[in-house]
Amino acid sequence: MRLNQFVCRTIAELDAQLIECRACPRLVEWREQVAHDKRAAFRDENYWGRPVPGLGPDDARLLLVGLAPAAHGGNRTGRMFTGDRSGDVLFAAMHAVGLSNQATSVAQGDGLRLIGTRVTAPVHCAPPDNKPTPTERDTCRGWLEKELGLLAPTVRAIVVLGAWGWQALLPALAESGWAIPKPKPRFGHGAHILLAPAGSDRAPLHLFGSYHVSQQNTFTGRLTPAMLESVLSDAATAAGLHPRR
Ligand code: SF4
């Protein structure tokens, strides 16, 4: 399947086409196998088992970029960072700084609403061990480029959660109309770079780095709620939103 065959004029069209994608054979097999086998705690639920689209308004000023959906989180609920421990940390922080109307995200239909902010990932299908291959990352980049292009009229800041997402996003940004400095900006928690537009139809874009909200980081204290809220607040301000913090 060639992603560039798709023409998406709106985020809604993008999401509708994305959820039909079967371009990565290993990930298609894995996401469907997990959805069939299920975790015991969720055995009575119908897993989503498909690509998980971005979450949030189509005129977002701030974009959060993670890694990929979790097998029993987004791959179960069909919504980014929804129904897993990483999401618990992320949405609590987003709510604390005024980027969501509630602090929890447990299932579709739970009333969650993001404020001026969209959440997406460079890879939209749950990968084994949370590790997409370079080929899978590059294949899914086409969707990310389309999303960046559609958000370009409004998006003014991006927060990347983790070094993997950072490396995946830079080529998509370059392809989507922003100039990436040489040498490439390095990921770090609290990193902040202002990207210049490469064309006249793009605005400058603030790029922020944060450690990922994985349990590996949050359980060890490498990433605390205060650290995450600080980056989100700075990025929201740069994006022209009005954070509480
Ligand atoms: Fe399609 Fe992306 Fe899923 Fe691969 S990871 S099957 S490109 S949605």
Image: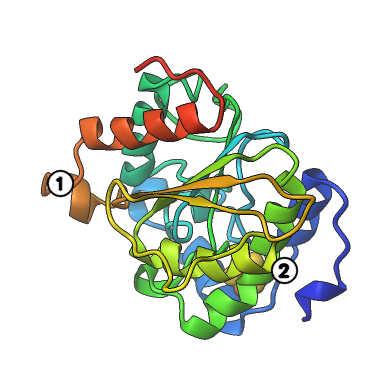
- Looking at the image, residue 205 sits to the left or right of residue 72; the answer is right
Question: What residue is disc 2 on?
Answer: 21
Can I make out residue 181 in this image?
yes
Amino acid at circle 1: Phe
Picture residue at 62% right of the left edge, 47% below the top: 54
Q: Which mark is residue 54?
A: none
In this rendering, position of residue 181 left or right of residue 23: left
Sequence-first tag of 1 and 2: 2
Q: Nearer the viewer, residue 220 or 125?
A: 220
Query: Mark 2 vs ligand 1: CB under 8 Å?
Result: yes
For the N terminus, give its image quadrant. Answer: bottom right
- Mark 2 residue crowding within 10 angstroms, few (<14) / some (14–19) / many (20+): some
Q: Secondary structure at mark 1?
A: loop
Q: Is residue 231 above or below residue 182?
A: above
SS of the residue at dot 2? Answer: loop
Residue 159, percent from left and from top? 45, 46
Which dot marks residue 219?
A: 1
Q: Is residue 40 left or right of residue 166?
A: left
Residue 84: give x, y in percent of width and height. Answer: 37, 44
Would you place residue 208 above or below residue 188 in this image?
above
Q: Amino acid at mark 2?
A: Cys
Which residue: 43% across, 62% down? 166
Nearer-the-camera pick, 37 or 82: 82
Q: How many residues crowd mark 1 within 10 Å: few (<14), some (14–19), many (20+)?
A: few
Percent coordinates x, y for residue 203 in the rendering: 68, 45
Do the CB atoms of the residues marked 1 and 2 lie less than 8 Å apart?
no
